[in-house]
Structure formats: C-alpha cells, structure tokens
Image (spheres, grey):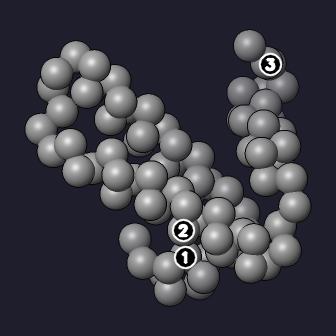
C-alpha cells in the first residue's frame, strides 16, 4: 500500500488498517513457523506497511496509538479482555 493511499483514509480507517495489517503479520509469522510461508518477503512488506500507517498517524498528530488500538479491540470484543 502506498503512503498516498493511506493519507486519503480517515483516522478510524487508519486504525482498522493497522489492526488488519497486524493480524496479517501474525498470520505470516505463524506460516513461517509451520514452514508454509511461500513468499518470505511478505513479512518485510507488511512491516513496512505498518510503519507507513504509523507515519501518517504521526503526521496527523495522533497520540497514544497503542492505547487507542487496545480500546478498539476491547470494544470489538464486547469489552472482554483476555
């Protein structure tokens, strides 16, 4: 994903994209462990995409991104934390 595409997204959409990318990275890491990962370059590409999202958030002056992500996850699960 290009950074110009990310800049067009709303802040809530950026948070959702960050969540999607983190889940995708988790899936890729799981595939790597089980030796089912066909394209290892996907790991670094996904990490770079995550960094791009953080860059756009920082440009917008977003503070406490991690805390907001945690809040969105808890709201998405009905307030239940693990």
Q: Considering only vertical position in the picture, is 64 above or below 76?
A: below
The reply to whether the C-beta atoms of the residues labelled 1 and 2 are less than 8 Å apart is: yes
Q: Is residue 11 above or below residue 34?
A: below
Q: Nearer the viewer, residue 14 or 76?
A: 14
Callout in the foreground (1, 2): 2
Query: Which sits earlier in the primary sequence, circle 1 or circle 2?
Result: 1
Q: Mark 1 to mark 2: distance in Å?
A: 8 Å
Q: CA distance from mark 2 to mark 3?
A: 30 Å
CA gap between label 3 and label 1 equals: 30 Å
Q: Residue 14, can we see it? A: no
- Determine which residue is flagged by label 2: 52
12 displayed left or right of 29:
right
Residue designated by label 3: 80
From the top left corner, tell me how far across and down residue 72 is, in percent: 77, 42
Query: Which mark, by number, is residue 6?
Result: 1
Position in image of residue 13 (x %, y %):
64, 64
In percent of width and height, residue 26 lies at 44, 32
Indicate the secondary structure of the residue bearing disc 3: loop
Mark closer to the chain start, 3 or 1: 1
* Quadrant of the image occupied by residue 33: top left
| Dot placed on the residue nearer the N-terminal end, 2 or 3 | 2
Q: Secondary structure at mark 2?
A: helix
């Amino acid at each position: 994903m290009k950074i110009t595409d990310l800049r067009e997204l709303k802040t809530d959409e950026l948070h959702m994209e960050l969540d999607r990318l983190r889940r995708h990275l988790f899936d890729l890491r799981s595939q790597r462990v089980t030796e089912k990962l066909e394209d290892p370059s996907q790991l670094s590409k996904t990490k770079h995409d995550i960094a791009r999202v953080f860059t756009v958030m920082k440009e917008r002056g977003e503070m406490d991104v991690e805390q907001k992500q945690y809040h969105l996850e808890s709201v998405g699960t009905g307030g239940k934390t693990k």
